[in-house]
Image: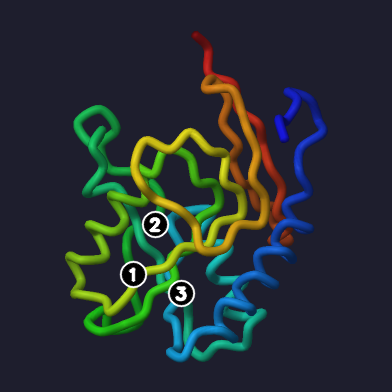
Amino acid sequence: MTLPSSPHLPDAEALYSELLRGVKQLLASSPVSLSLAGITSGGAWLAERLQRDLGLPGTAGVISSSMHRDDFAQRGLAASAQTALPFDVNGAHVLLIDDVLYTGRTLRAVINELFDYGRPASVRLAVLVDRGGRELPIQADVCALRVELPAGQSLELARDEAARLSFVLETKEA
């Protein structure tokens, strides 16, 4: 599916319901408990909500890609939240949550960040949207929607004051 550059964006709340369903299935089929960690900022919003809606104890972790990005020299530190993992990473089965999966470079940086905190037993991935365009061999275990976008467009998750989710389509100028 290709998204038009118009107000016809996917319904983020409906996609969240699909993500929740997929994560429930993943948890039901897993013989071990999973610790959730959301990638700042959209993934962190999703992980927080999943933690609550799944009735999991404690709080979901937040993980930042800032320190391990391959474009750190150009971008510097992001103003978004920094890594806070309320569980011991050593031996943990971690489910990373992200809003939009594209090239895989953010995930590579996040996995490096995760290993700075310890050695997990396993790492899985759940995303709201996979937009293709992978540059690294990374794939989501759970994905609510797969779409194709032109290289000059990006899909970003937004959250309003009432915590309702929506998408914004950004177009980069050539």
Residue 86: x and y in percent read: 35, 80
Task: Give the residue number, with chain letter if any, for mark 2.
Answer: 81
Residue 110: x and y in percent read: 31, 55
Snapshot quadrant of residue 17: bottom right
Instruction: Tell me if 113 is positioned left or right of 5 in this view.
Output: left
Task: Give the residue number, with chain letter if any, for mark 1.
Answer: 84
Q: Residue at x 40, y 66 (%)?
A: 62
For the residue pair 27 and 40, the one nearer the viewer reads as 27
Q: Residue furthest right?
A: 8
Q: How many marks?
A: 3
User: First in sequence: mark 1 or mark 3?
Assistant: 3
Instruction: Label 2, secondary structure: give it.
Output: loop
Instruction: Label 3, secondary structure: give it.
Output: strand
Front position among marks 1 and 3: 3
Q: Which amino acid is tagged 3?
A: Leu
Instruction: Label 1, secondary structure: give it.
Output: loop
Answer yes or no: do the residues labelled 3 and 2 have beta carbons within 8 Å? no
Quadrant into which the N terminus falls:
top right
Task: Give the residue number, with chain letter if any, for mark 3.
Answer: 36
